[in-house]
Image: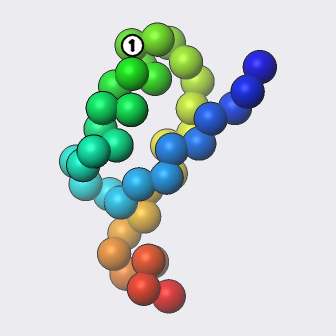
């Protein structure tokens, strides 16, 4: 089975829908959230 990774900024955004779909489907996924400080570097 595939392992999914969801890369997003640490805020509610368009990715929130994808996150909720993973949870509703009881699908395991890695939730990777970036802070703005990390994105700049």
Q: Position of residue 28 (x, y in %)?
A: 58, 24
Count of numbered badges drawn on the protein: 1
Q: Is residue 9 left or right of residue 13?
A: right
Which structural element holds mark 1?
helix
27 is higher (above) or lower (below) than 29 = above
Of the pair 30 and 15, the residue shown nearer to us: 15
11 is higher (above) or lower (below) than 19 = below
Q: Is residue 30 left or right of residue 34?
A: right
Q: Position of residue 2 (x, y in %)?
A: 73, 27
Q: Residues within 10 Å of mark 1 (few under 14, many from 20)?
A: few
Instruction: Name the residue at 42% across, 64% down.
Output: 34
Please give the residue where the numbered disc 1 appears in the rendered image: 24
Q: Is residue 14 left or right of residue 7?
A: left
The answer to which quarter of the image holds residue 3 is top right
Instruction: Name the residue at 34% across, 25% down.
Output: 20
The extreme left residue here reads 12
The answer to which quarter of the image holds residue 11 is bottom left
Q: Position of residue 12 (x, y in %)?
A: 22, 48
34 is higher (above) or lower (below) than 40 = above
The extreme right residue here reads 1
Instruction: Name the residue at 45% across, 77% down.
Output: 38
Instruction: Name the residue at 39% across, 32% down.
Output: 18
Of the pair 14 and 5, the residue shown nearer to us: 14
């Amino acid at each position: 089975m595939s392992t999914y990774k969801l890369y997003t900024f640490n805020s509610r955004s368009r990715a929130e829908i994808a996150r909720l779909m993973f949870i509703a489907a009881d699908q395991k996924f890695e939730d990777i959230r970036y802070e703005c400080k990390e994105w700049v570097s």
